[in-house]
Image (cartoon, rainbow, N blue to C red):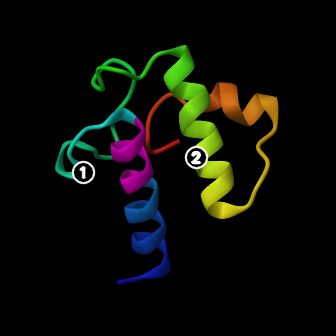
């Protein structure tokens, strides 16, 4: 598994956990329109989980640019 594939898998796992859905239901096109609990509060939970997992801090413009998993 390539580094890129591992990263995608980690992100998909985070998304699945945050929104309490099966990982098989998450793909690069998953978005607030396709994931039931992905609302503004869910977006904040997702960002926080990603920041904690990867030990990063996202800038506000990065946060607002996330419209689907692929972003």
Secondary structure character of the magenta stretch overall: helix
Q: Along the line of sight, which residue is nearer the eye, 51 or 31?
A: 51
x and y percentages locating residue 25 in the rendered image: 19, 42
* Residue drawn at the location 18% of the way across and 51% of the way down: 24
* Residue drawn at the location 62% of the way across and 38% of the way down: 47
Q: Along the line of sight, which residue is nearer the eye, 28 or 10?
A: 10
Quadrant in which residue 62 is drawn = top right
Residue identifier under label 1: 23
Q: Is residue 68 above or below residue 50?
A: above
Q: Along the line of sight, which residue is nearer the eye, 1 or 14?
A: 14
Q: Find residue 42 and name its label.
A: none
Query: From mark 1 to mark 2, how far is it between C-alphas?
Result: 16 Å
Residue identifier under label 2: 49
In the image, taking residue 40 as reference, residue 69 lies left or right, namely: left
- Would you call the spot at circle 2 few (<14 residues within 10 Å), some (14-19), or many (20 or more)? some
Q: Is residue 17 magenta?
A: yes
Quadrant in which residue 66 is drawn = top right
SS type, badge 2: helix
SS type, badge 1: helix
Q: Quadrant of the N terminus?
A: bottom left
Q: Is residue 15 magenta?
A: yes
Where does the magenta region start and end?
12-18
- Would you call the spot at circle 1 few (<14 residues within 10 Å), some (14-19), or many (20 or more)? some
* Residue drawn at the location 51% of the way across and 28% of the way down: 67
Going from N to C along the chain, the mark reached first, 1 or 2, is 1
């Amino acid at each position: 598994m390539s580094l890129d594939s591992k990263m995608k898998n980690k992100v998909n796992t985070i998304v699945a956990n945050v929104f309490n859905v099966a990982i098989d239901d998450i793909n690069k096109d998953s978005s607030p329109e396709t994931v039931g609990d992905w609302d503004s509060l869910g977006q904040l939970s997702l960002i926080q989980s990603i920041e904690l997992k990867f030990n990063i801090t996202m800038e506000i413009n990065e946060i607002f640019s996330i419209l689907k998993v692929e972003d």
